Structure formats: structure tokens, C-alpha cells
Image (cartoon, rainbow, N blue to C red):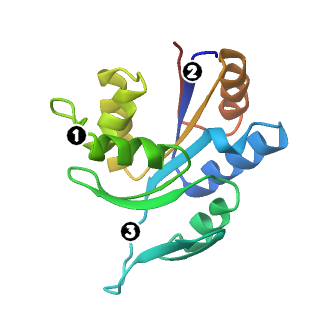
């Protein structure tokens, strides 16, 4: 079995992230190997949340259409409140990594559950801080994993899709 490698790209807006996901899908990237994470602020004082019932997901919030559209592409979805970052909506395998960090008490010195999840898959701490800062600044992250060839191909696609930055983390 080959070791997993990762590409992590930062996007300024949800529409840029959504366009990048569509480009990856067109290129044949396995959507089960893609995660997206971002903040979703609700400007009203109403309850914000979503539920996942099988393949049907409902979500209410400022970016509801964006997140709702992604659930059809991505495997798994969740809403977390991460101290120091705030409310995060997460889709894809990253959900499992965060839950694993929480359940396994894998919180690593100075890292929250999001950071511990990234650290557990081999992302260096200095990169984790950059990604957390991006989320705090209301940016969106796309995380793809796979063989080195898969993530290198994904990185090339993501770099043409208006990302702020794209980095490879290879085993």
C-alpha cells in the first residue's frame, strides 16, 4: 500500500473553492479523497446547523447553498466549534481525522482538534499554524490526499483555480 500524500490549497472565497472542486472532479480526482473546511457565519440570531440523514443533508446558514452543494461531492460532513478558530463546517475525510483526534485525546501540545487532526496525518506544525490563520481570516481550505502522482496532479489543477497558495506534503 502506498503512503498518503497531501495537497492543501487556500482559497479566499467559497465560490473559488467550489470552482476548484468542480475542476478536480472534471479531471477525475477521487472526491472521497477531498476535504473542504471553512467558516460559516450566520448574521442573524437564529439557530444555525445541519443534519446528515443518509445521503440527504440539510443546512441552514449564510453559505447554505455552497455547503449543501458540496455534500453531494464529498464523503462525510460535520460542524465543529474549534476554540481559537470558531465555527467550522467540514466535509470529507477531515471529519474523521478531527473526530479521531478528539476521541483519541490526540491533542498535541498547543494544537486544537483541527491542528491535531492535521498533525496526525503528518502535516508540520508550522504549516498547521498557517492553515489555522487562514481559517481565522475566513478563507477556505481544500485538502486532497492520495499517491504522490495524484496530489501533484491535483496541485497543478488547484493552482490554476485562483487559490491563494497550494502546498504539497509528501510522505
Q: Residues within 10 Å of mark 1 (few under 14, many from 20)?
A: few
**Residue 105 got which mark?**
1
Relative placement, left or right, of 52 versus 137 is right
> Quick check: can you spot residue 162?
no
Of label 2 and label 1, which has the lower sequence position? 2
Residue at coordinates 31% horizontally, 36% vertically from top-left?
115
Q: Position of residue 87 (x, y in %)?
A: 33, 61
Residue at coordinates 66% horizontally, 44% vertically from top-left?
32
Distance, label 1 to label 3, CA atoms, is 28 Å
Q: Position of residue 53 (x, y in %)?
A: 57, 73
Contact? badges 2 and 3 (CB < 8 Å): no
Local SS, label 2: strand
To which quarter of the image does residue 28 belong? top right
Specify the farthest residue to the left: 109
Q: Nearer the viewer, mark 2 or mark 3?
A: 2
Of label 2 and label 3, which has the lower sequence position? 2
Q: Nearer the viewer, mark 1 or mark 3?
A: 1
Distance, label 2 to label 1, CA atoms, is 24 Å
Q: Quadrant of the N terminus?
A: top right
Q: Nearer the viewer, residue 42 or 3?
A: 3
Q: Nearer the viewer, residue 99 or 29?
A: 99
Amino acid at each position: 500500500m502506498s503512503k498518503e500524500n497531501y495537497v492543501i490549497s487556500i482559497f479566499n472565497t467559497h465560490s473559488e473553492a467550489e470552482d476548484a472542486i468542480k475542476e478536480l472532479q472534471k479531471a477525475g480526482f477521487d472526491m472521497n479523497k477531498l476535504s473542504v473546511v471553512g467558516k460559516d457565519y450566520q448574521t442573524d440570531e437564529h439557530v444555525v446547523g445541519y443534519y446528515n440523514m443518509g445521503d440527504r443533508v440539510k443546512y441552514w446558514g449564510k453559505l447554505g447553498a455552497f455547503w449543501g452543494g458540496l455534500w453531494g461531492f464529498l464523503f462525510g460532513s460535520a460542524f465543529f466549534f474549534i476554540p481559537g478558530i470558531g465555527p467550522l463546517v467540514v466535509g470529507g475525510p477531515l471529519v474523521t481525522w478531527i473526530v479521531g483526534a478528539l476521541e483519541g485525546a490526540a491533542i498535541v501540545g498547543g494544537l486544537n482538534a483541527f491542528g491535531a487532526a492535521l498533525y496526525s496525518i503528518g502535516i508540520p506544525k508550522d504549516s498547521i499554524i498557517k492553515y489555522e490563520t487562514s481559517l481565522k481570516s475566513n478563507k477556505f481550505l481544500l485538502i486532497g490526499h492520495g499517491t504522490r502522482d495524484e496530489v501533484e496532479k491535483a496541485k497543478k489543477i488547484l493552482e490554476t483555480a485562483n487559490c491563494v497558495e497550494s502546498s504539497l506534503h509528501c510522505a
